[in-house]
Each structure stands twice: as structure tokens, then as C-alpha cells.
Image (spheres, coloured by chain):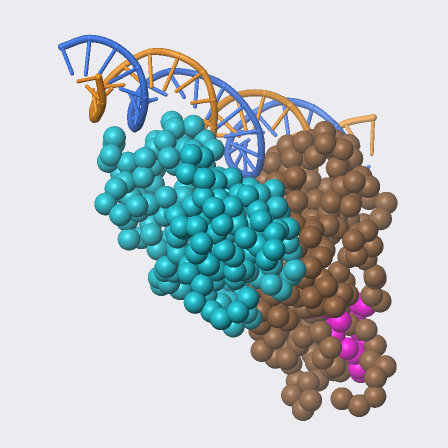
Chain colours: A cyan, B brown, C orange, D blue
Amino acid sequence: MPSPTVENYLKALFQLAVPERGVSTRELAGRLLVKDASVTHMLKRLSGTGMVSYEPYRGATLTPEGRQAATAVLRRHRILELFLHRMCRLSLDKVHAEAERLEHAASEDFVDALDRLMDFPTLDPHGDPIPDREGRLRGIDSRPLTDIPPGARVVLVRVEDARPEALTYLVSEGLVPGRKVTVARRLDFDGSVELQLGRRRLMLARELAEGIHVTPDEGSAE
Amino acid sequence: MPSPTVENYLKALFQLAVPERGVSTRELAGRLLVKDASVTHMLKRLSGTGMVSYEPYRGATLTPEGRQAATAVLRRHRILELFLHRMCRLSLDKVHAEAERLEHAASEDFVDALDRLMDFPTLDPHGDPIPDREGRLRGIDSRPLTDIPPGARVVLVRVEDARPEALTYLVSEGLVPGRKVTVARRLDFDGSVELQLGRRRLMLARELAEGIHVTPDEGSAE
DNA sequence: GCCGAACTTTAGATTCCCCTAAACTTCCTT
DNA sequence: AAGGAAGTTTAGGGGAATCTAAAGTTCGGC
């Protein structure tokens, strides 16, 4: 059984992966808030266990086994988040940290039981897809708010769980998955986005807008 | 936040405690499956943090803070066990190990939410009382099966979760909290006990019988 | 009161895992 | 091809938790 730290490396590797390119040491170090050297060291270790294929100076990629392990962690994380939010009524800004700890202790059996208890959900409370037992992710066709042209009416699909305070703010403004909004303006010079929320307007800094993924609104009324 | 190991020491200290007497190094070592010297070392550490009062060669006792921390772990453990059994439908012989891992990652908030979800239960699935938030335990007046005179009709109150295989066996025989049985015989030379189960008789070795706590049956029919 | 058995502590190592700082190498851009 | 940025290695540290071996303490029985 991999240690929590190893699981976190695998998860980060999975989430930072882009097709055709290894994940760089620096990128990983940034995500995991550790120094580059620690990452190098760990990548060697992971490479030794066959979870990661690692070419010095070329970055690292998950092997099939590594990918499987990573999606298993992700699955545990997201099912736990949903359970904590939907059934335990913990607030959105708290579930991430709690799930982050529990995901390393929860067995597959337990998580499968939660999955059943919630009738096999497909999205976590942030709108992120929950991998199935085989590690398959149902992709959702969404784009970050910063990519949307002004005037478009969209539905929030995914709100990243970056910093708890940011989440708290977004929730307080009603910006949660499912919410429909219209993009009023986009300020190209700094990437911020202004939204029309009912009769109110709200300005979002680029940093926030980038973490909000939307899809065109095809529904009827608000 | 105490490490899992520290929490396990505190829990063991609490469970082995007898009024007026410190818990001995050996006893702890036996329970935690480590060497005596390791226990001494840890006891000193815990003594330094004010959780344990420790006098060399005299054993150790929990301080009020230590006791509070220990019952908090116990509360998390038992609520988790009940949740895993009652709501997740994990079998009795699996819940202990799972709870043992989760108890060190679960926050009070989460456990309180489970508590609410199950409508504030007072007993875990083994029949052990669940401490309240202040660490109070509602005692239950029960005696081990080995203390019961032949002929007595009793209700199982608590079935200790010692070894999973033992539990599996007891469950398969229907010996779970709430079950009513009659003590048929007691073999004083080895401490084993024979039970009358409906029309069947079942012999239990002392080791097993000691872990089964019962109270006189005051109910009506079977 | 002494002695030995049972128990406990001390001392010193080890393992695991993770970390940082700083020196060093490679790569890429100019 | 030089120089700086990016990446890697070396060297070293630390804490947590464990172990073995040996020395010390307690205590009951003779």
C-alpha cells in the first residue's frame, strides 16, 4: 500500500498530465509545495516501483499501473467529497481538506459502499467527474470562463477547489455547479471577466475565472 | 494533532486503565504489539506533552487532557464502526480494521455529522458504548459470560472485537449483541462455557467466552 | 534480610520517509 | 558558443517509531 505522500504524487502527476508531454519536476514541486530536489528524489523512487516512467531532464509520466493507482485515489477523493457534502452537509470549502485526509485511509470497499449509498453519482460537488472502478473518466465538454465570448449564456459545470477562501466567496455569490450566468464583459488586458447574475453584475479576477468551467446553456428559462 | 501512533497509545492506555493503578509497560507493549523498550520511550514522550503522567517503574496514567484525547479517538472509532456497519453494510469482522484506519484521519466535524446522520446512537455494533463529545461513557452493567452461573437466561450486550476470525465465527453462530441465550454449563477447570441456542448447544472456549458480555434477560419471550 | 524472577529502563542503532541547501549538469536562447 | 534558466545530484538532517542488548529496579518468598 502506497504511503499518503506517494498517493499525492501520483494524483498530482495525473492531474498535471498533458498528452505527449511528461510532467516537469518544477511543476510537480509547485503543486505539492515541496522543493524540486524532493520531487526528483521521489520520482526516482516511483520509477523504481514501476508506477512512473521517468527520464531525467524529460519529466515523468504515469505508467498504466501508476495511472490506475492515481485514478483510484481520485475516485476515493471525489466520492468522499460528495458524501461529505451531500450526506454530511459539510460546507463546500471544508470538504476538500477532509477528503484529502480520508482518501489515504479509506479502503475500496468503504468507498464502493459510499458510492452505492449515493446511487453511483458521476460528479463530485465541484463538478469534477468521478472515475469509475476501472479508472475511466467521463469527460465533460467545458471551457474556462476566461475563454467565453461576452454575451454568451452558460451553465457552470465545474468550480475548482483551489483555496477554501476563494470557494467560500464563490459559494456566497451563488456560483456553484448548475448555476446559469451570462458573460457581460471580458477585460482582455488582465483576463478578468464580468458576469451578469440576475440583475447584478459581478467582476471576477482572472485567477478566479480560470477555475470556473462552463458549457453553453441549452436549457430553457432560468 | 497527535500522530496515529500516539492516538493508539492513548486509546490503549484508556482501555487498559483500572482505577487506582497505572498501566504497566508490559501490558501496553502486549496490547500494541511492540517491545517494552519502545513503550518506555513513547511514555516519556507523552509525559513530556502532558498527556500522560508517568513514573518510571510505576506505570502510566492518562492526565485529564490525555483522557479527553483518548475518548475522542474512541468516539471517532465507535461512530465510524457503527456507520460502516449500519449504513455501509460492511460486515462486523471488517469494520474494526477500517475504523482503525479512518479514526486517525476523520475530523470531529465529520464524525459529528455521522453521529447526526445516525440519530445520535449510544452503542457501537459490538455493543460498546459511544463516548459523548465531553468524553463521558454511559456504563452498561454487564458481566463476561464466564461469570454467569449455569441456568441463567441472558442477553448479549457486548461482543469484543478481538480477532476478526473469532468475530466471524461468533456472527455465524448468531452471537451478536441483542441475542438471548441460556447458559447450559460451565466447565470450571478450563473456563469454557456451553450455551443453549434454541435447540442447539454450543461450546465456547474460555478465550471467546471472556469477550462476550451479558446482562440478565428481563424481556418476555424469545 | 537476601535472592532471583519478573519487569523496566537505558543506550545505541536502524529503518523509513521525507525534507533542505548548495553544488553541479544540461539545455536552450541569443 | 556563452551564459543563464531549468533541472539534477550530492550531502546531510531530522523526526517518528521501532528494535536489541545490557544494565537497573522491584518485589515476593524463603
Q: Looking at the image, which is closer to me, A168 or A192?
A: A192
Q: Which residue occupies the foreground of this view, A16 or B190?
A: A16
Span colored in magenta: B142-161
Q: Residue at x 74, y 74 (%)?
A: B156
- Determine the residue positioned at 54% across, 60% down: A179
B169 left or right of B133? left
- Residue B212 included in the magenta stretch of the image: no
* In this view, B38 is above or below A181: above
Q: Is residue B136 above or below residue B55?
A: below
Locate the N terminus of chain B and report the quarter of the image it occupies: top right
Task: Please name the residue shown 65% across and 35% down the image.
Answer: B42
Q: Position of residue B54 (x, y in %)?
A: 76, 34
Residue A77 showing in the rendered view: no
- B45 sits left or right of A39 in the view: right
Residue A140's spot in the image, x, y percent? Answer: 38, 60
Residue at 51% x, 46% y is: A194
For residue B147: magenta? yes
